[in-house]
Structures are given as C-alpha cells and as structure tokens.
Image (tube, rainbow, N blue to C red):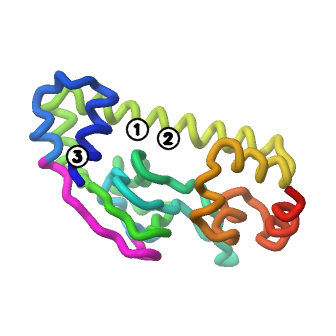
Amino acid sequence: MIEVLRQHITSRLGNDIDNLDKVLAAFKHIRAKRNEQLLLQGDACKYVYFIAKGCLQVYVYDKDFNETTRDLVIEDNWCSELVSFGSGNPSTENIRAVEPCELFAIDRQAFQTMMETVPQFDKVYKQILEASYANAVYRINTFVALSALDRIKWLMEYRPSLMTRLSSKLIASYLGINKDVFSRLKAKL
C-alpha cells in the first residue's frame, strides 16, 4: 500500500528524489473503518492524511447541531485541518471516514522534521496547501453562483464518482442542499 504514496510523491516531484525512503518511513499506515472519527471539532489536529483508498468527509456542526460538509476527499489526495495542524490550536472541523479507508498519516513533529531536512518535502506541502486553497475557493465561488440543480449538474460533471459511492444525505450536505430537495432535483436529471 505504501507504493501508492510513493507513486503520488514521485508523480509530483519526479523520480530523482533524495530521501524518499526517509519521507515514506515518516508516515504510519492507518486502516479506518466506515464512520470512524479521525478528528473531532475542538481537538487539536495531529495528522495530515494521504488517502490511498476510501473517502474522508470534512465537516462542521452549526449551533443547532446541523452538519455541513466542507469537503469530500477521495483517493490520491491529502486531508487535514491545516490551521489546527499547523498551530496546535483546537480544530474548527471534524474529519470522518465515510468508507473503509487506507490512509498514511504523518504527525506534526515528523512533518516539521521532513520540512527541515528534506527540501523536496516542502514542495509537496506547498502543493497540498495550494490544492486545498484552490479547491475551497473554487467550490465556494462556484456554489454561490449556482442554483441547487446546477450544483448537482456540477457534481455530476466534475466529481461523478461521488454520486455512486456516497449517500444522498452526504452529497446534499456537500452541495449545501436539503436532502429532500436534492432527491427531487436529482430525479429530474
């Protein structure tokens, strides 16, 4: 399974990576069960996860304990609550495995060590940050401008695998649509 992470890193940095085995050794393999909580709002985020298999949900609760999904992160991507991970402060988000997952996790201390001792790792981190920021901004800007039906069409075009592998309730939360409205609109397509 570590080969998936090796391929991910080399696809971004090329095959000539000094200390790649050292970087890979800094990660621990975690198997998360479906619905397993990896981070609870209010706890400090201790890990950055690379998803080799499965899907993670990043979400928050409002004051009425309604769940809103910020992101659904699938294979070959990174997931964390980066503000909490970087600062050690309490997290404002939750992370849950919505499918059985194969993850590679790196803790804050090992992450810092890699940043200081392996120059290429800094590039990977910058790519994680850039991708996370770009995804969040794009999704917010896109969803603000789209109707509920257009959000469903957007998901079907840009992230079609989510439609078949996740529950309607979870997808509705991700799209910011009531689940009954989502079901009704989806039936029209």
Residue 102 locus on image (x, y percent): 32, 62
Amino acid type assigned to the residue bearing label 2 in the image? Ser
Circle 2 residue: 132
Q: Is residue 27 magenta?
A: yes
Q: Position of residue 79 (x, y in %)?
A: 42, 52
Relative to 94, 84 lies left or right = left
Return the x and y of residue 77 as percentages of the image width and height: 42, 46
Based on the picture, tell me whether residue 158 belongs to the magenta stretch: no
Question: Are discs 1 and 2 less than 8 Å apart at CB?
Answer: yes
Quarter of the image that includes the N terminus:
bottom left
Q: Quadrant of residue 31?
A: bottom left
Q: Identify the image quadrant of residue 49.
A: bottom left
Q: Residues within 10 Å of mark 1 (few under 14, many from 20)?
A: some
Q: Residue at x 67, y 63 (%)?
A: 171
| 136 relative to 106 in the view: left or right | right
- The residue where tag 1 is placed is 128
Magenta residue span: 25-37
Rendered position, 81 above or below 22: below
Label 3: how many residues lie within 10 Å, few (<14), some (14-19) or many (20+)? few
> Disc 1 versus disc 2: distance between alpha carbons?
6 Å
| Residue underneath mark 3 | 3
The amino acid pointed to by label 1 is: Ile
**Which secondary structure, mark 3?**
helix
Taking depth in this image into account, of 40 and 143 the one nearest to the observer is 143
Q: Separation of disc 3 and disc 2 at Cα? A: 23 Å
Three-letter residue code for mark 3: Glu
The local crowd at label 2, few if under 14, some if 14 to 19, many if 20 or more residues have their Cα within 10 Å, is some
At 27% from the left and 55% from the top, the residue drawn is: 104
